[in-house]
Amino acid sequence: MARKFRGRHIGPRAQDFSDALGLGSDDRSIAILDADGVAPAAIQALFELVTEKDRRIETLDERLSKLEASSSKQRVSNRTIRSLYEAKSRTSLKGVSRSVKSGR
């Protein structure tokens, strides 16, 4: 007689488990040994994936910091150039204004 399970359960279906991993003697049941072996392997694979992503994030953070610093320097340079240009323009306009007043 088959046992009836009461309540809700979560877990892979035996066919999906067999298809995905090629484990077990059939696709109608999951041996506890297989399930217990897959869990640590999955955890290790996820750990490696997260570690790889952490390295990538660190690299991107470093690149972003360098770009932000470069951008900041560029803004300072642009402000300096703008200030020099505006000062030169004011000086040139004063000279034009004097020339117009003197009739040259």
Image (cartoon, helix red, strand yellow):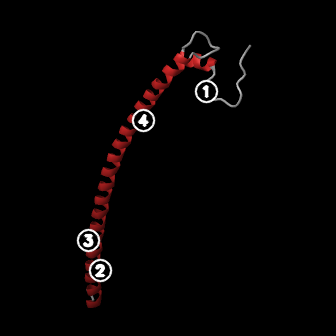
Instruction: Left or right? Give the position of 30 relative to 97.
Output: right
Residue at the image position 50 percent from the left and 25 percent from the top: 39
Residue picked out by circle 1:
11
For label 4, the residue is 50
**Label 1 near label 4: C-beta < 8 Å?**
no
Along the polypeptide, which appears first: circle 2 or circle 4? Answer: 4
- What is the distance, in whole Å, between disc 1 and disc 3 at their CAs? 71 Å
Q: Position of residue 97 (x, y in %)?
A: 29, 85
Nearer the observer, disc 1 or disc 3? Answer: 1
Give the distance between the C-alpha atoms of the residues marked 4 and 3, in whole angstroms.
51 Å
- Residue 32 lies in quadrant: top right
Of the residues shown, which amino acid type is indicated by label 3? Leu
Q: CA–CA distance between discs 2 and 3?
A: 14 Å
Please tell me whether mark 2 or mark 3 is closer to you in this view. 3
Viewer-side label of 4, 1: 1
Check if mark 1's residue and mark 2's residue have beta carbons within 8 Å. Answer: no
Give the spatial CA distance, label 2 vs label 4. Answer: 63 Å
